Image (cartoon, helix red, strand yellow):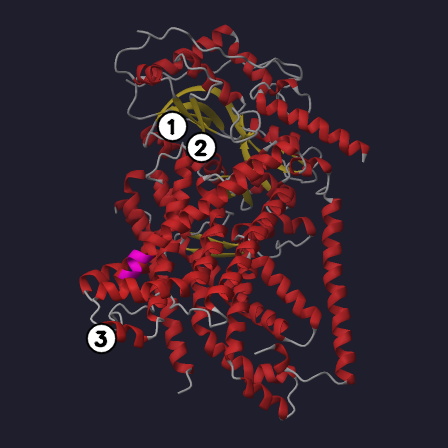
Amino acid sequence: MRRMKLGMTAVAVLLAGSLVACGEAGEDDDGGGGTGVEGAEPLTVEAESDCDGKFEEGSRMAELAEAGEIAIGNRVDQPGLGQQDTPDSVPEGFDIDMAKLLIADLCIDPESDAVNWTEAVSEQREQFLEDGTVDLVAASYSITDERRELVGQAGPYLLTGQQVLVPIDSEVESIADLEGEEVCAAEGSTSLENIELEGAVGVPAATYGQCAEDVVNGTVPAMSTDGSILRGLAQQYEGEVKVVGPEFSEERIGIGYSPDAPEMCEWINGVITEAYDSGDWEQAFQYHLGTEDEDAPEPPALDECQA
Amino acid sequence: MDVVWEHREAIALAFAYTVLLFLIAGVGSTILGTLLAGMRVGPIPVLRWAGAGYVTLVRNTPLVIVIIFFRYAAPKIDLKFNFIDVVIPTGAGDIRLNNIFAACTVGLTMYTAAFVCEALRSGINAVPLGQAEAARAVGMPFGGVMRHVVLPQAFRASIPPLANVQIALIKNTTVAGALGVAEAFVRMRGLINIDATARIPIFIAFAAIFVVLVEIISFAAHRLERRVRVA
Amino acid sequence: MSGSVLFDAPGPRSVVRHRLYTVITSVVLLGALGYAVVRLEQNGQFEYEKWEPFVSPVYIETILVDGVLETVKMAFSAILLAVGFGVLFGIGKLSDHGLVRWPCWAVVEFWRAVPVLLSMIFIGAYLDLSQLSHRYWAVVIALMLYNGAVLAEIFRAGVNAVPHGQVEAAYAVGMRKTQVMLAIQLPQAVKIMLPALISQCVVALKDTALGYAVLAPGLTFVARLIYNNPDFGQNQLPTVFVIAMIYIVLNLILTAIATWVQKKFVGEKKVLEVAMVGEGDPTAAAPK
């Protein structure tokens, strides 16, 4: 009883903390902080103060800076990349930090209500950009030729490879062992396509959390997506699942923007390059995705913007 | 309309799942619902309570939650359907009746059975009192009264409400889509994401197929009702 | 017909048999329940961490305010709009003019036959879904269309259930069509409809759970946030259990209200019978 009471108080304090000071969850050491290197500092992003004349007249950036409001499509269920605690809190993750840098460059405070964080599940990302539901997508959004025909994609700001998550006692060693077997991934994601290219049968799920439950329950023998997401999940199901196999695809994670605003590409690349140079990128990487054993990798080279 | 035509095979495959979900859950729920109705009007109090409890619980729970139970909770209490693994090859791709399909089907069956039970109970209530009394008077036990006298007439009286239950079932199969079966709803959402500008023709196409399926059930129920009607 | 009509009062041998059945059933049911509890315990589903959000005040408030309240609001907005839709198209279906009757019939049949999830995605494709309020409306509008179509049918049946003689009498004293509808048929139809209307509320309330497909606010939204939060160690099951209980309690309250209304306003009369989809014959105008 005493233990429970103590627990309750601790929880209440933790929750109150995470609700009031959302985005600063690095302070609690109860797993709610950074998913990367222990003790790494979270990146704090401050809004630029002067945007008058900063952007070309009539460009989408100028419009957004002028409006002082922006809508971002993000994930809420990918620890390390994009994750959210309560409906009103600012999400956290590496994707989110990249988005915050972009938002701040428009002189909008990334922690304020002027930012409309919108969950964009894999299946909806193109539609959201096409119909203007969101201005930018920062939702572990892989750059592909098919997508570039529908929407704009700048980057990549992160390279990851797809791996496989299996139960801890599984004999599966890589995707090659799963030919003809069911493998779970998010609906409409490149992960799902890659699984089928490798000869396994894709099982769509709304979120990666559901996939992980299916793996733990033995409903499917494996799930597969970016290694960084899998490692985040493996941490949560410690002792029940493991990440195996070589990376069998290269995912190039980028920022999505409206097909009607090609001018955003140069701007996004500019902000990301700045983050590479200033060390912000590395700091965010270490905090969310880094491991104790390795240093942060070199930031990936950005694609040229198509005219 | 192009996008619909272009993906006609995938759409057909999706509706094959829809129809399979409907047929299996339809038959299953009718059997289970009849058993439940028997329990609810039978002489054994524990069975009556169990039946009533089941119906109250399931009827008041959203279907999504019932299916989530069989998809995610059932495996944790060793209720797994991994022994089910049928692959039906078709020209447009395989139809896979696997454990996920089975869990969704069981969820749909268990949910629909509660409504079948209530439809039948209303039918049983419509059978004139004298019939059951007469059957008892000639010495029939409860099982006999039900099997030979009450249920045949109850089914007849229940056809319209039962048809409504089955119509609801075919629409409810879409919920399985959100939990891992690649049926019509999943396909429609996928197509709208590929080509948002064609959302009207895509929606009309899918909706029209559902209207046709519903009308088929409705028509079949009418024919059935007419055939078994007592003049 | 009460249950007792179907079987005789049990004799001594039946009593013994029934006791046996009772024991077997109880053992099987309790055994299954016990097994489930043990397995869930072994799976760590009862760990405090997983139930933490449901005993901590901050989350209870979130569940009640962002969850229950939003869900109930969604269901009631949908039903209110559906009543308008239902009365409009119900009267339309009763019209003497084919030009009014047929389109109304088509609209009602269409929305009764289309799965709510499909309409929800379709409507969602027209709204800017970045706003929580828009996702709210995607659910409300989809539910309005379906429940409205059902209510139109209920309404039509309600009007037709008003005894014919009253309508004839009203015409006999020189009332017009509109007057007969407004003064004679409508008030009585509404009274007959009430219980059916409240049962439809149960349907609408349950269907709000489909809003998860467009990430609509309400209980399913709060549930996602809770089980996506790594602090609670993947507590999908406890979350779904709690959400299910909330839905069941809400629906039982509604059902109790429906029963009370039925007794109070309608008496123990037979519940209104509504035609199934495809049965409402559009060629049949209102009986005069």
Q: Residue at x 56, y 20 (%)?
A: A23
Figure quadrant of residue B215: bottom left
Split into 4 quadrants, where in the image is the C terminus of chain A?
Answer: top left
* Most foreground residue, B51 or B180: B51
Could you give the CA–CA distance between mark 2 and mark 1, rounded to whole angstroms?
Answer: 9 Å
Does residue C68 sit above or below C28 in this rendering?
Answer: above
Q: Please say whether residue B1 is one of the residues in the magenta stretch.
A: no
Q: Residue furthest front?
A: C173
The location of residue B216, given as percent across then percent down, is: 36, 67
Instruction: Please tell me which residue is depicted at 62% across the width and 31% down the height of the picture.
Output: C58
Chain letter of the residue beneath label 3 in the structure image = C
Mark 2 and mark 3: span between their CA atoms?
63 Å
Vertical side of C267 occupied by B183: above or below: above
Q: Secondary structure at mark 3?
A: helix
According to the image, label 2 marks what residue? A120
Query: How far apart are labels 1 and 3 at the CA level?
Result: 63 Å
Q: Are marks 1 and 3 on the same chain?
A: no
For label 1, the SS is loop
Q: Which residue is mark 1?
A: A134
Circle 3 sits on which residue?
A: C172
